[in-house]
Image (cartoon, rainbow, N blue to C red):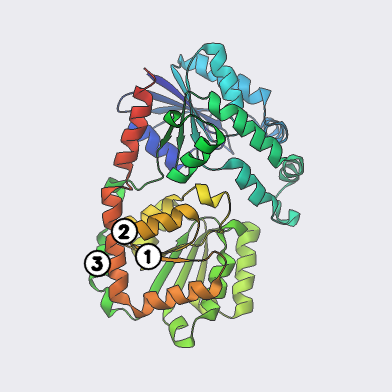
Amino acid sequence: MRIGMILPGKFPPDIRVEKEFETLKEEHEVFLLCLRRDEQPIRENWRGMEISRVFSRAERWWSQWNLMSRCYSGTWEAAIENFLVSISADALHVHDLPLLGPALKAAENLQIPVVADLHENYPAMLEDTLKAPIRRTSSLGSLASRLSISVPRWSAYEESTVPQANRVIVVIEEARERLVRMGVPAEKVSVVGNYATLDNVDNRDREARSATRHDMSRLRVIYAGGFDPTRDLVTVLDAVKALPDQVRAAIDVQLIGGMGRDLSQLSQHAAALGIEEHVTLLQWLPRPEAERLMNEADVGLVPHVKSAHTDSTVPHKLFQYMWRRLPVIVSDCAPLERIVRESDCGFVYPSGDSLALARCLSEMHSRQDRAITLGEAGRRAVARKYNWDKAGETLLQVYRSLT
């Protein structure tokens, strides 16, 4: 089968697209259509996948404004149909909700099936984004898009388009349950999780650290991801400030992935709290560098704000931590809490509660043998269940069902 994959962003990088391609190429040919950014070539062969990139800067702005304000872009529909014709596609794989409408119309014209790959509860994500102050908007184009967004319109768009897809894949069980409640037939929806790929994680540094864990005087805590307010890193900083002096002196917190205003504001907050020597704020790093720092850490953090959005999605980093034998501390977003409690691989605290998070950090520091046990449990859970081998087989079964 010749699969046309559509991504409403640039590539590379995108860890989900990468993993799906590596799996699907075992049985299919995969082609990718995505946005062109900076000096990226219009055509490229990436590890055997043919990539087509579209739109000038002006075209990107116009298509994005139409997409966000109207839940539709004729520019994208035409680009998708031309792409599908050019590769003689047998199926269309659409990443995330925004392009599902244009993709369905293009696929209908060509009489090919559509797989909707929904990374998150998109209307709820937009609702969370709109809660942030307008001053955080990075450009006039982003401001125009933001002012034109209607969450009710996006919710109605989701309810009308998702059931039309031939198959739907989501990242976690809670997302599947939400779509079924929304009226999508249960037999259409499969979970292809953001799980760890077992064969590309070098655990040597982590295993060496585990062997000497009980001799260490300092606890290295890591967070890797975005710095926007929905990640709730302010609560992390407040928790470090709330630690008893002797515990704070023995903990190093690394927050990785910041950019622009978000990084600057968190740096200012850390300075105002007087905790700069205990917290390192790093900008976005290439994946190998971020993974090296994960290998050197002792505890993984996922402090996301609990919301309708975060109650139906899950980040890759949770499983990356677990596979590295890192005990985890997570907020009580529904999937995070369920996975951590079922796996007995860490601690859960109420979202936004810095004192509760401080108690979790203190307990990780004071009960190092327990921390090792939690980390080993997390690794076993990934080896048994939360790994890409299993998720990839589900993805292949989705496509086998189309033939």
Q: Quadrant of residue 212?
A: bottom left
Q: Of tags 2 and 3, which is closer to the observer? A: 2
Q: Residue at x 55, y 79 (%)?
A: 241
At numbered mark 1, what does the secondary structure look like: helix, strand or loop? strand
Q: Quadrant of the C terminus?
A: top left
Residue bearing the label numbered 1:
346
1 or 3: mark nearer the eye = 1
Numbered disc 3: secondary structure: helix
Q: Position of residue 213 (x, y in %)?
A: 28, 74
Which residue is drawn at the image coordinates 57% and 74% (left, top)? 238
Q: Nearer the viewer, residue 389 or 81?
A: 389
Q: CA distance from mark 1 to mark 3?
A: 21 Å
x then y, percent, for residue 183: 54, 32
User: Would you say the residues marked 2 and 1 are in contact, meaning their CB atoms lie under 8 Å apart?
Assistant: yes
Q: Determine whether, in the image, residue 141 is placed left or right of residue 204.
A: right
In the displayed image of the protein, which residue is found farthest to the bottom? Answer: 246
Element on which disc 2 rests? helix
Residue marked by disc 2? 378
Q: Residues within 10 Å of mark 2 (few under 14, many from 20)?
A: many
Residue 320: assigned label = none
* Amino acid type assigned to the residue bearing label 3 in the image: Ala
> Can the viewer see residue 184 in this picture?
yes
Q: Identify which amino acid the numbered label 1 is placed on.
A: Gly
**Residue 82 falls in image quadrant:** top right
